[in-house]
Image (cartoon, rainbow, N blue to C red):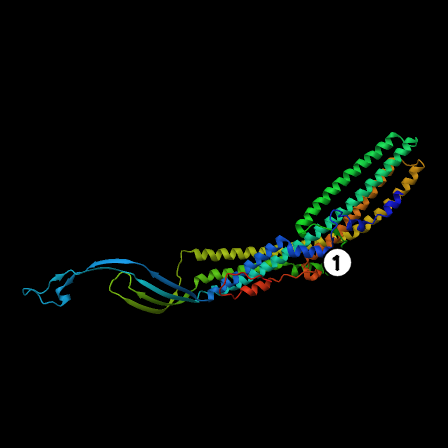
């Protein structure tokens, strides 16, 4: 009867139906990945960061555009002036034959001066700083998009791990439940044999000890399952239902290690992020060097005054001007040279970061490849271990019935079989996780490759919405 119970146990079926407290919905790995892609807050925050980085481009392009300002001023003024005028200034003949004489006229009053003006400033040349800032902003946008791709891969991989951990832990819970049932049956049979004098009290104590140990393992498995449910909820965005079995994605990965390494260095978004950061750092050097070049600006000004400030005699005036200014920097305290040196050091750092990223990708691909090979071999080994443990347990039980084996031997064989079945579950988990990990390291863990039922987020949509915007404070939706 015990043997039939074990033979009826289907590992994947138990995993698929283990979430007994969440019976409303059946989840698949693809559907869970799609949910994480849509709703994961970490990923949505990274998308918002990319949209914020997009704004660097219109900010840089603003350097090509004119700056327009309208001014207006008005108020009340009170003036009182006393002037000194000579007779010659007044054209009055001299008195007593003596030419000259002096008068002191006074003027006082109130008025309300008002003026309006329009100023237009256009930069003609600033050492190519605007052009280089624009190219730098575009490189920053590309780096941010590559960083978003890294976040997408990390979220999807975390979702795979969360899904497979829950699937594994659910299967282990079912294994431990079945083990407790078997141990309870074993204890019942041992007590019956003890009552008829076939075994000793020691055998009963060993069966009781094994049952207590099995219950402890079940409690541990249930605690692990509860933790996996919480992680699933955090990564995927909703509580799990029945989990369907998953399959590896080896078909999307290269078939040799050499091809995997080459694809990883070429396609991994972490490498792309490093490359775009190098481009941005190179352009920053050119921007700082532009501070040493001449600067040319043209400015147009129109001014209309009514009742000018500082005088009571001017009733109205108008002025207009167009002036060009050329500034040739000679020495600005030395800060510009320090900024150039600093930018060059940052460029060197970014190049080293790129080399580090390539080395890390190479190491990660090789490690993931090795883990995948080991997981494949481990499945075969653990399955063979289960088959051998089942045969051994059945044989030991038969031998125990005729007195050739002790109860302790049966319990040991039972625990060996349980451990072997847990090892199979773990190996199947590791096999699938390793295949997704390799896919992420070669830069292909994305919704389009996996064919997920989800609308793929396109960051260039928001970029095109804001790139050439001259005005406006409303944020486009970016979709």
Residue 67 in which image quadrant: bottom left
Residue 371 lies, in percent from the top left, at: 73, 52
- Residue sitting at the far right: 402
Nearer-the-camera pick, 174 or 438: 174
Q: Is residue 265 left or right of residue 389?
A: left
Q: In this view, does 134 lie above or below 239?
A: below
Q: In which quarter of the image is the C terminus?
A: bottom right
Q: Is residue 395 left or right of residue 60?
A: right
Residue neighbourhood size for the residue with mark 1, other residues' Cα within 10 Å, grouped as few (<14), some (14–19), many (≥20): some
Whether residue 374 is visible here, answered yes or no, is: no
Count numbered badges in the picture.
1
Q: In this view, does 102 lie to the left or right of 377?
A: left
Residue 389 in which image quadrant: top right
Residue at the (66%, 49%) spot, across then down: 234
Residue 106 in which image quadrant: bottom left
Residue at the (58%, 55%) spot, across then down: 352
Residue 307 lies, in percent from the top left, at: 28, 64
Residue 80 lies, in percent from the top left, at: 22, 58
Nearer-the-camera pick, 351 or 310: 310
Q: In which quarter of the image is the N terminus?
A: top right
Nearer-the-camera pick, 100 or 431: 100
Q: In this view, does 208 lie above or below 425?
A: above
Badge 1 is on which residue? 250
Residue 294 lies, in percent from the top left, at: 42, 65
Whether residue 64 is visible here, answered yes or no, is: yes
Residue at the (26%, 57%) spot, across then down: 78
SS label for mark 1? helix
Q: In this view, does 416 lie to the left or right of 82?
A: right
Nearer-the-camera pick, 102 or 132: 102
């Amino acid at each position: 009867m015990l043997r039939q119970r074990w033979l009826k146990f289907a590992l994947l079926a138990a995993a698929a139906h283990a979430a007994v407290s969440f019976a409303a919905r059946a989840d698949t790995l693809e559907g869970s990945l799609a949910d994480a892609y849509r709703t994961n807050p970490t990923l949505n925050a990274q998308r918002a960061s990319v949209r914020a980085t997009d704004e660097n481009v219109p900010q840089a392009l603003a350097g090509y555009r004119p700056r327009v300002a309208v001014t207006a001023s008005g108020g009340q003024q009170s003036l009182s002036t006393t002037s000194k005028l000579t007779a010659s200034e007044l054209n009055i003949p001299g008195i007593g034959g003596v030419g000259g004489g002096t008068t002191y006229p006074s003027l006082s009053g109130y008025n309300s001066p008002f003026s309006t003006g329009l100023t237009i400033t256009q930069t003609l040349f600033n050492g190519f700083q605007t052009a280089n800032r624009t190219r730098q902003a575009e490189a920053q946008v590309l780096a941010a998009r590559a960083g978003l791709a890294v976040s997408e891969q990390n979220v999807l991989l975390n979702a795979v791990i969360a899904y497979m951990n829950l699937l594994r832990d659910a299967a282990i819970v079912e294994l431990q439940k079945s083990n407790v049932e078997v141990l309870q049956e074993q204890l019942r049979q041992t007590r019956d044999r003890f009552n008829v004098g076939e075994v000793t009290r020691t055998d009963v104590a060993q069966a009781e000890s094994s049952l207590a140990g099995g219950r402890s393992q079940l409690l541990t498995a249930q605690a692990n399952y509860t933790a996996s449910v919480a992680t699933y909820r955090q990564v995927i965005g909703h509580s799990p239902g029945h989990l369907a079995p998953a399959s590896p994605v080896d078909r999307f990965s290269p078939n040799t290690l050499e091809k995997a390494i080459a694809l990883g260095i070429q396609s991994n978004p972490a490498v792309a992020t490093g490359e775009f950061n190098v481009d941005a750092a190179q352009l920053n050097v050119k921007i700082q060097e532009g501070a040493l070049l001449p600067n040319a600006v043209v400015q147009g000004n129109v001014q209309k005054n009514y009742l000018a400030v500082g005088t009571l005699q001017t009733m109205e005036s108008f002025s207009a001007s167009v002036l060009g200014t050329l500034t040739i920097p000679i020495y600005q305290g030395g800060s510009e040279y320090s900024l150039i040196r600093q930018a060059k050091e940052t460029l060197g750092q970014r190049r080293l970061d790129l080399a580090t990223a390539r080395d890390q990708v190479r190491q990660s691909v090789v490690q993931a490849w090795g883990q995948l090979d080991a997981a494949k071999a481990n499945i075969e080994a653990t399955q063979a271990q289960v088959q051998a443990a089942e045969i051994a347990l059945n044989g030991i039980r038969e031998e125990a019935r005729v007195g050739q084996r002790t109860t302790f031997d049966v319990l040991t064989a039972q625990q060996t079989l349980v451990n072997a079945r847990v090892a199979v579950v773990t190996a199947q988990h590791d096999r699938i996780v390793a295949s997704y990990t390799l896919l992420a390291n070669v830069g292909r863990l994305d919704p389009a490759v996996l064919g997920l039922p989800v609308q793929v987020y396109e960051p260039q949509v928001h970029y095109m919405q804001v790139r050439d915007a001259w005005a406006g404070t409303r944020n486009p939706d970016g979709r």
